Image (cartoon, grey):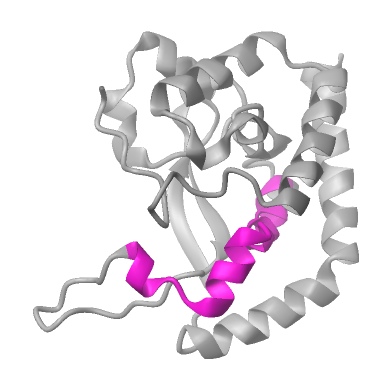
Amino acid sequence: MYKTIFKRVFDFSAALLGLILLSPIFFIVTIGLYFANQGKPFFFQLRPGKHGAIFKIIKFKTMNDKKDVNGNLLSDGDRLTKIGAFVRKTSLDEIPQLLNVIKGDMSLIGPRPLLPQYLHLYNEFQNRRHEVKPGITGWAQVNGRNAISWDTKFELDVWYVDHFNFTLDMKIFFLTIKKIIKTEGINAADVATMEPFNGK
């Protein structure tokens, strides 16, 4: 019952309430990033959802679009703005995804949606992460987030697919709050974002 009906009802209700309660923070961060990113406070990107269906995810834009003399984007670390670093460290960049949850593209809890270009790189086991809707937070996020290897991330994602229920989702929810407060596992060591997945 929870997997087929109640999870969606809970997602919609909690996301709507969360968006209302967080609206003052949403507004302040939007204004700050508007000026930091030359009028572009939001970041839109295509991501695979349940069964690999593509949707457009929305996040706060934490990196600017500065380029080198050859017109190539600078490294992630060089483009990460001061306010963007704060927003990412506190996980405030995930707030706009509540709109994705309300729309039904995502769940509050589930495997994080990765990039579409990774789809053809997954083996059968790794691809099982798409058997459920992707989430704003998930089992891999509370067990290391970007500080763990790709292999471990996939193992945790598939474990969630096989075991999720209301009790586990509540555990992940409260562990996420704990992780945000402690700002643990935001990035892999010495890099601004996790290294791209290459299929190995």
Residue at x 42%, y 28% (from the top left corner):
149
Question: Would residue 4 be seen by someone viewing this image from the given angle?
Answer: yes
47 up-or-down from 138: above or below: below
Residue at x 33%, y 21% (from the top left corner):
122
- Residue 176 located within the stretch drawn in magenta: no
Q: Nearer the viewer, residue 5 or 87?
A: 87
The quarter holding residue 79 reads bottom left
Q: Nearer the viewer, residue 91 or 6?
A: 91
Q: What's the magenta region? A: 76-101
Overall secondary structure of the magenta section: helix
Q: Residue 107: x and y, percent?
A: 70, 37
Q: Residue 168: x and y, percent?
A: 80, 20
6 up-or-down from 33: above or below: above
Q: Residue 177: x and y, percent?
A: 80, 45
Quadrant the C terminus occupies? top left
Quadrant the N terminus occupies? top right
Residue at x 51%, y 69% (from the top left corner):
62
152 up-or-down from 148: above or below: above
Q: Nearer the viewer, residue 16 or 81?
A: 81
Residue at x 84%, y 37% (from the top left corner):
174
Is 95 positioned to the left or the right of 56 in the image?
Answer: right
